[in-house]
Image: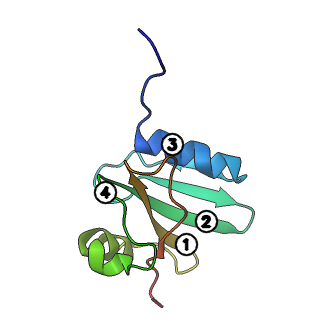
Amino acid sequence: MRGTRPTKPIEEAQRCAEKMGYHWIKNTDSALPFDAFMFLQAAIAAIKIKKIRHAIDENAFVGHLFPDEVDALRLLQLPPHVLRELWIRTQKRAGMAAVLYHAGDNC
């Protein structure tokens, strides 16, 4: 067997968050529509990972491209200081995309 095992988007996102200095806690409740919490000092975010086949325009409004995911993040019963983020992983780019969307109430 040659090469390395392909990583899952959630594992890649965790490594990305940890490289930025965040701690990562995977969501173990499948009824909640997010993948993990990441936190650092006074910042905490609920993260949803979305893997897509094709690249998207970096100027595109993510809320229009992925309305179901954004709505699910907005409906999470979390305190207002908890950020809600949708992270996008495409097959066309190496690595996890930067945070593309804050799905908080003020968007």
Tell me the element at label 3. helix
Asked if residue 9 is positioned above or below residue 38 in the image, the reply reads above
Residue carrying label 4: 54
Residue 60 is situated, as x and y percent measured from the top left of the image, at: 38, 79
Does 85 appear above or below 74?
above
The disc, 1 or 4, on the residue closer to the chain's N-terminal end is 4
- Per the image, the residue denoted by label 2 is 44
Question: Residue 49: x percent and y percent?
Answer: 40, 55
Residue under the image location 43 percent in, 49 percent down? 27
Mark 1 vs mark 4, CA separation in Å? 30 Å
Whole-angstrom CA distance, mark 4 to mark 3, is 18 Å
Give the mark nearer the N terminus: 4 vs 2: 2
Dot 1 and dot 2 residues touching (CB under 8 Å): yes
Nearest to N terminus: mark 1 or mark 3 = 3
As drawn, 22 above or below 46: above
Q: Which residue is mark 3?
A: 12
The residue at which mark 1 appears reads as 82
Q: Amino acid at mark 4?
A: His
Task: Give residue 75's position: percent from left, percent from top.
Answer: 33, 76
Query: Residue 52: x percent and y percent?
Result: 31, 54
Q: What residue type is disc 1 on?
A: Val
